[in-house]
Structures are given as structure tokens and as C-alpha cells.
Image (cartoon, rainbow, N blue to C red):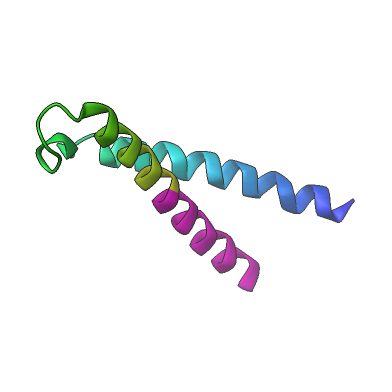
Amino acid sequence: MKMVNIMDYRVYIYALMLFATTFAFSGININSIFRKGHVIEARIFLMLLIASVSYLASRFIISFIECF
């Protein structure tokens, strides 16, 4: 039963960090880094970057919470 409680707050933290990083990266013009006309590649890169940064931030917060 304790395992269910641990998983509950992790899901909320992952969702919160995914929302926060999506909001943070929405202000960055990623299309200027890529060549002209490669919009799909830029969006795929942005999605992967958002997923990786939100995972890292979530794991940091979860490990910080589990220390206490």
C-alpha cells in the first residue's frame, strides 16, 4: 500500500514539471537554430528537449523530497 502513495506524488511532479518546462521553452525561438524550412525537425528536437529537461527536473525534486 505504501508503494501506491509513493507513486501518486511522483506522477504529479512529472506532470507539473512537464507543464513548467513546456511553458519555459515556449519563449525560445528554436527555429532560428535550424535551417530554413526544417520546422518539423525543430519541433521534434524541442519535444525531446522538453521531455529530457522535465525528467531531469522531476528526478531532482523527487530525490530531494525522498531525502527527508
Query: Does residue 68 appear in the picture of this structure?
Result: no
The correct choice, above or below, for 36 with respect to 3 in the image is: above
Q: Residue at x 51, y 54 (%)?
A: 58
The count of marks equals 0
Give whichever of 52, 64 is nearer the camera: 52
Q: Residue at x 44, y 45 (%)?
A: 51
Place of residue 59 in the rendered image (x, y in percent of width and height, measured from the top left): 53, 60
Answer with left or right where residue 59 lies relative to residue 57: right
Q: Main secondary structure of the magenta part?
A: helix
Q: Quadrant of the C terminus?
A: bottom right
Place of residue 36 in the rendered image (x, y in percent of width and height, measured from the top left): 9, 31
Q: Residue at x 42, y 36 (%)?
A: 19
The answer to which image quadrant residue 63 occupies is bottom right
Residue extending farthest to the bottom is: 67
Answer with left or right where residue 7 lies relative to residue 37: right
Was residue 60 drawn as part of the magenta stretch in this picture?
yes
Give whichever of 50, 67 is nearer the camera: 50
Answer with left or right where residue 19 lies relative to residue 61: left
Place of residue 67 in the rendered image (x, y in percent of width and height, measured from the top left): 62, 73
Give, as a single range, the part of the protein colored magenta: 52-67
Answer with left or right where residue 37 lies relative to residue 14: left
Query: Does residue 17 appear in the picture of this structure?
Result: yes
Q: Residue at x 19, y 36 (%)?
A: 27
Place of residue 23 in the rendered image (x, y in percent of width and height, measured from the top left): 31, 36
Residue extending farthest to the right is: 1
The answer to which image quadrant residue 20 occupies is top left
